[in-house]
Image (cartoon, rainbow, N blue to C red):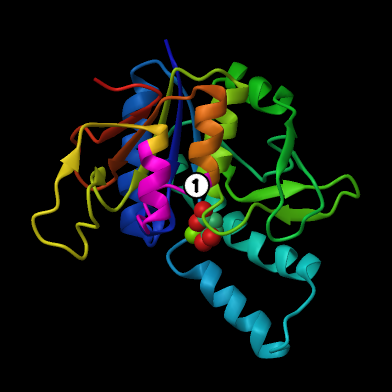
């Protein structure tokens, strides 16, 4: 039995049909006897829409504390919706907000850094046999105020959980089937890579590849968490990201 951390981005959980698709991917791993922790982002364009709302009230920019309070709601919605979808498959599941999953961060609102993860609650839920759905992107500072990890921060949430719990696998699902030399959504004939190093991945990200969030790759490198980037729509191997590749 393995511990698998799976992260699904906003496009992978954008509507009921996609939620069911994701639930079935999770079901497969769970029924094979694995412990499964799932990190999700807000559905579709929810985060952008929430930010738009905020700036429509105050174009000069609301306080960062209140922005975090607002945008973290996107992930609160998606974790509960995914958990409800998994309930329809008859599987035991619990959704957890970032703070419930133990994420402590600094107070740098809208770009907070993770300081510590208290893994107790997650361990308890796994021991009960539950699939855990964690809100990506969210943390709590020392004043008990909600924080967020910066745009695309759910990748970092997933890597941090994988590192803290020494997961056997950390899979980042997206709407492309792996890492390409150039963006396959924009360039025809782009080549998919089977493997790539953390450093190459960071370089690609600097060149504008939007597959993995930079901080998540830095964290994966620091804690030596091997990542797999794969598609939530097609079941085939993706790209492995690790320290050394042949
Ligand atoms: N929902 C947040 C964002 O859009 C976090 C994430 O997607 O990882 O930036
Ligand atoms: Mg998002």
Does mark 1 have its CB less than 8 Å from ligand 1?
no
**Residue 91: in magenta span:** no
Residue 227 % position (x, y): 40, 30
Identify which residue is drawn at 22% across, 48% down: 181
Position of 169 with respect to 193 (left or right) is right
Q: Residues within 10 Å of mark 1 (few under 14, many from 20)?
A: many
For label 1, the SS is: helix
Residue 243 % position (x, y): 40, 23
Mark 1 = which residue?
A: 214
Viewport quadrant of the C terminus: top left
Identify which residue is drawn at 51% across, 69% down: 46
Viewer-closest of 186 and 146: 186
> Going by the picture, which residue comes out furthest to the top?
1
Residue 116 % position (x, y): 75, 32
Residue 15 % position (x, y): 37, 62
The answer to whether one can see residue 166 in this image is yes
Identify which residue is drawn at 82% across, 52% down: 107
Q: Can you tell which quarter of the image residue 89 is in?
A: top left
Give the vertical position of 107 relative to 202 (above or below). below
For the magenta stretch, what is the residue range?
200-214
How many marks overall? 1
């Amino acid at each position: 039995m393995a511990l698998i951390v799976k992260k699904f981005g906003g496009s992978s959980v954008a509507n009921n049909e996609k939620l069911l698709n994701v639930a079935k991917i999770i079901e497969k791993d769970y029924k094979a006897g694995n412990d499964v922790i799932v990190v999700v982002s807000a559905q579709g364009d929810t985060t952008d829409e929430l930010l738009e709302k905020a700036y429509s009230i105050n174009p000069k920019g609301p306080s960062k504390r209140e922005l975090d309070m607002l945008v973290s709601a996107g992930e609160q919605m998606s974790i509960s919706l995914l958990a409800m979808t998994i309930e329809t498959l008859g599987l035991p599941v619990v959704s957890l907000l970032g703070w419930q999953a133990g994420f402590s961060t600094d107070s740098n609102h809208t770009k907070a850094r993770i300081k510590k993860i208290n893994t107790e609650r997650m361990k308890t839920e796994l021991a009960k046999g539950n699939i855990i759905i964690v809100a990506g992107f969210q943390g709590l500072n020392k004043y008990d105020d909600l924080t967020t990890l910066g745009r695309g921060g759910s990748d970092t949430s997933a890597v941090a959980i994988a590192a803290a719990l020494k997961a056997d696998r950390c899979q980042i699902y997206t709407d492309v089937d792996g890492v390409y030399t150039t963006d396959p959504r924009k360039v025809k004939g782009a080549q998919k890579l089977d493997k790539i190093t953390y450093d190459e991945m960071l370089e690609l990200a600097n060149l504008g590849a939007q597959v993995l969030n930079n901080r998540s790759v830095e964290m994966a490198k620091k804690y030596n968490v091997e990542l797999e980037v794969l598609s939530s729509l097609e079941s085939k191997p993706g790209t492995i990201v690790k320290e050394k590749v042949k």
